[in-house]
Image (cartoon, rainbow, N blue to C red):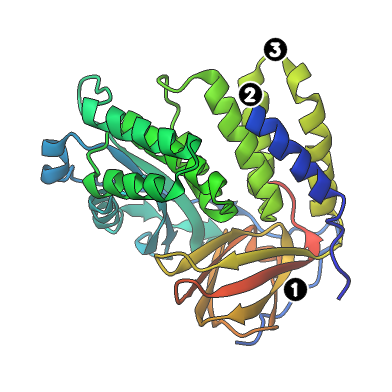
Amino acid sequence: MNKPNLLRLTPVALALLALSAQASSAPELTPQPTLSEHIATVIEAQPVKRVDPKYPVSSARKGQEGWVAVSFVINEDGGVEDPVVQDSSGLKAFEKATLQAVKRWQYSPAIQDGKPIQQCRNMVRMDFRLQGKLGVTRKFLRQYREVTDAINAKDLALAAEKLTEMKDDQLWNHIESAYFWLADSYYAKAIQDDARELKSVRRATIIENESIKKSTRQYLLQRRFVLAVNLSEYRDALETYNKLVELAGDDQSQLAQLSLYADQVRELMTSTEPMIRKASIDDEGRVFHELSRNAFELNIAQGDLHEVQIRCDNKLSRFTAVSQSQWHIPSTWGHCSVFVSGTPGAEFEVIELGEYVGEI
């Protein structure tokens, strides 16, 4: 297998790091139809009943707020199946409440050429907010300063200890949550853990928060772009770049350099060069990957992988995770995401092959 053309992206990422610091068997492939051939008429599923999640009583008493992003499948009867927490602000009570609510949702099923079908790429984010404007508590502010002071003093052992104390308390509202993940991203950068930093930066920026200065948000989005490129999560990199464009508003001059790198990412994604992402199963036993191509394979480096779920617009398929097996996805399935489950810490590669499937 030829190596992907990533050498030119490596100096790009290094330059941006400095910049931001300153501021089973495979399914058969369906033959491609001609341009004049009718493929399908699809009517998307529509909500009929959506039950709001119950606010956890204990969380309300503590003043906790949070958010949960959940992925789920709508079956041929319009019911919800296989809800999975894709990410969250980190509080398990909100994750549990979200899953309980989503399982009770009902839709009119998606229709393809007059027949009900699965709709498998659905994602919603639940925001849990309390009435009134909540600020940062004195205790949280003290803890936050202890963490950042320890990082600045290069006392990373103390910083790790203080971060653990903050996480154990979990007395977070939306503002505190953003600042906790901001502090965690600083620590992850100091210990050069790119995967942890990317996860923390995403969580710090997922909700628009007026308490975070524009310059800080720009820094976080720049870091997210750099890290996503470094970790070969190219779709996320481009989505992040678009957020930077929106944040810059009329002053696009500051993005002149970044735009060149974004163009290189687009060029790679739309080429036929293999794209390799090195991944490891997280503490929840999973990894999510958004596909840009119509084929991929897994190479297991160490540890155990259990299952590969391919969730497409109108198809859900499950396979055992076998190293060096290739999956070829029919164009009729639409855009797809891959969910890999396994033992936490297991390391593997997702290698995207084939043709670019277009924008989502």
Task: Work out whether 173 lies above or below 302.
Answer: above
Q: How far separated are the C-alphas under marks 3 and 1? A: 45 Å
Residue at 40% across / 20% down in the picture? 211
Helix, strand or loop status at disc 3: loop
Disc 2 packing (10 Å; few <14; some 14–19; many ≥20): few
Helix, strand or loop status at disc 2: helix
Label disc, if present, on residue 30 of the rendered structure: 1
* In contact (CB < 8 Å): disc 3 and disc 1: no
Which quarter shows the N terminus?
A: bottom right
Q: How far separated are the C-alphas under marks 3 and 2? A: 9 Å
User: Looking at the rendering, which quadrant does residue 292 occupy?
Assistant: bottom right
Amino acid type at circle 3 is Asp
Q: Nearer the viewer, residue 163 or 51?
A: 163
Residue 95, percent from left and from top: 29, 53
Decide if residue 147 is on the left or right side of residue 165: right
Residue 230, percent from left and from top: 70, 51
Task: Work out whether 77 lies above or below 122.
Answer: below
Helix, strand or loop status at disc 1: loop
Amino acid type at circle 1 is Thr
Q: Earlier in the sequence, mark 2 or mark 1?
A: 1
Residue 223, percent from left and from top: 62, 38
Q: Nearer the viewer, mark 3 or mark 1?
A: 3
Disc 3 packing (10 Å; few <14; some 14–19; many ≥20): few
Circle 2 sits on which residue?
A: 246
Q: Visible in this render: residue 178?
A: no
Residue 120, percent from left and from top: 50, 61
Task: Work out whether 293 lies above or below 60.
Answer: below
Amino acid type at circle 2 is Glu
* In contact (CB < 8 Å): disc 3 and disc 2: no
Q: Nearer the viewer, residue 343 or 47?
A: 343
Label disc, if present, on residue 250 of the rendered structure: 3
